[in-house]
Image (cartoon, rainbow, N blue to C red):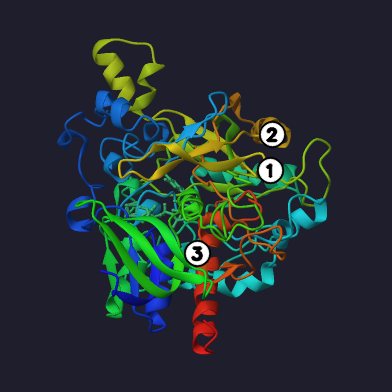
Amino acid sequence: MANQVYDAIVIGSGITGGWAAKELTEKGLRTLVLEAGRPIRPEQDYVEHVGVWEVKYRGLGDRKREMREQFVQRECSAMDEWSSKFFVSDQENPYTTDPRKPFLWIRGRQVGGRSIMWGRQSYRWSDLDFEANAREGIAVDWPIRYKDIAPWYDYVEDFIGVTGQAEGLSQLPDGKFLPPMEMTCAEVIVKDAIAKNFPGERMMTIGRAAVLTKPHNGRAPCHYCGPCHRGCSTRSYFSSLNATLPVAQATGKLTIRPYSIVHSLIFDSTTRRISGIRVIDGQTRQPLEFRARIVFLCASALESTRILLNSATPEFPAGLANSSGELGHNLMDHTMGAGASGRIAADEKMMQAGRRPNGIYVPRFRNVKQKHPTFVRGYGYQGSGYRDDWERGTQLVGFGADFKRALKKPGPWLFTFYGFGECLPNPNNYIELNKEKTDAWGIPTLNIHCAFGDNERAMLKDMSLSAAEMLTATGATEIQPFIEDNAPGLTIHEMGTARMGRDPKTSVLNAHNQAHEIPNLFLTDGACMTSSACVNPSLTYMALTARACDYAVGLMKKGEL
Ligand SMILES: Cc1cc2nc3c(=O)[nH]c(=O)nc-3n(C[C@H](O)[C@H](O)[C@H](O)COP(=O)(O)OP(=O)(O)OC[C@H]3O[C@@H](n4cnc5c(N)ncnc54)[C@H](O)[C@@H]3O)c2cc1C
Ligand code: SF4
């Protein structure tokens, strides 16, 4: 096995691994993708059109099995009877936390990773985000600015297809959008009320999502069937399986090896480069080794850092590429789940058509023009205006035929704002290797220490108040503000632990996602993030990955790698 040599090895085939595979193969590199999970065959594994009457537990799921095997994953709202097969077994993939600091680590282990179940919301960062650490003296400065990544956002959006509306906001730069999806009449009412009551401060736009609203790059537009987290047979939303991996495959340069669990990287102290990858075959449990000129770590934020921690050598006793001591530190996840809902006096003759796989978005407005007195950074709201449906049966009082008839009528128009807030980098939020506890393949697991701080909590309070304020301005009734007490991890935007930076003494990666200390090692998933902004992060991971691939291949061509 040791003489299997490739130009490049990519570890992981999720959102970032898929992009690395596409870019590296298109640039002519013979590329091996090592993926821990099983292969996925869309024609049999995608189940978005399977009816509730066709599944054993009628959509309620096998709760006993879930409690036993997926006790963490079942906390994710996208895990259901259909999609549970796309989430990991918590029995096979354990981790530990401080008892008073829960962290819900939601993962997918299969070809495609979490790109199958992701929510597809796709927003650009701005310089408000890239400059924040430097401006406030928090953590370290990002080594890049918006101008460095903007062409790569263009490049990625051109390929994946993002529906959205250009709005000309400095804090949420416009992208290369496909036609926007329509708002419901309740959403139009709320949007107009925000524009009238908060001019120059707040606004509402339709969500920006990696879903096609017209044919794009050989993929069909969305037909609004709804349950995207179960797959998409028409390839209408972006995933590795639907978009990047088929393109990589078509180059003839790609080898995907499923059931290949990367144990650690082999460091050659003479060349000071990665000389090989140690893999455990997930089916036979045989140890294997693979070699390549360059390595892209794309196993997802915490898994990539776990691999580096588990690759310690005498030169790097605290983990590979970790002379800075920063590896594992500054774990972040967005806060989620403060907001408000209410009843909107919209036209009750109007109905929603189809199941739009997207909502609305209220871009960040805190600390954009004016400094907020109780917290730094900001938050945005996702949400929607919708008619309450038959599920309101639990709140309706009634019995017999009249009750059934009442349930068949659509309910009132409701509206919910659901906030997502920035999380500050904090060195006390960190991961470390737990050698006492191993996973099903004998690999040391992670001990995760993470909790939200005062800034995040102050922001959650404001999210709820501001949402209620906007609903009040709309004339909504039955307004219910809420603050959910969600543990970190559940937003599934976990990032940080191998940050980018200008100085090798205080960061792990340089401005091109290359390890400061190991030139042929690139890490482009969420581990690289130096701060978290408040928008969904995957579009930024994709742009950073494409940019790093371009840089790495450039170095190879110049003979510098
Ligand atoms: C329900 C849900 C909704 C989400 N909604 C959004 C959203 O709206 N917008 C957004 O921006 N983000 C969203 N996310 C987050 C998004 O899915 C992740 O940010 C993104 O998938 C990260 O990409 P990745 O390549 O780093 O990791 P993943 O997509 O998780 O892929 C990692 C891959 O690496 C493999 N791997 C792990 N360890 C090893 C190993 N040791 N050896 C070999 N392979 C390994 C895994 O099996 C997996 O296939 C959502 C996620 C979920 C689950
Ligand atoms: S709603 Fe659209 S994107 Fe989602 S699964 Fe259906 S067709 Fe695909």
For the residues carrying marks 2 and 1, which lies nearer the camera in this image?
A: 1
Query: What is the x, y in percent for residue 424?
Result: 69, 44
- Residue 376: quarter of image: top right
Kindly identify which residue carries mark 1: 426
Residue displayed at 25% across by 69% down? 1
Residue 542's disc number: 3
What amino acid is at disc 1?
Asn
Whole-angstrom CA distance, mark 3 to mark 1, is 24 Å
Q: Position of residue 244 (x, y in %)?
A: 37, 68
The one nearer the camera, 299 or 196, is 299
Residue 446 visible to the viewer: yes
Q: CA distance from mark 2 to mark 3?
A: 29 Å
Quick one: label 2 or label 1, which is nearer the N terminus? 1
Crowdedness of circle 2 by 10 Å Cα count: few (<14), some, many (20+)? few
On residue 114, the disc is none
Question: CB atoms at circles 2 and 1 under 8 Å apart?
Answer: yes
Is residue 431 depicted above or below 526 in this figure? above
Task: For ligand 1, tell me if the residue under mark 1 lies within 8 Å.
Answer: no
Direction from residue 358 to residue 133 in the image, left or right: right
* Foreground disc of the pair 2, 3: 2
Per the rendering, the mark at residue 453 is: 2
Q: Mark 3: which secondary structure? A: helix
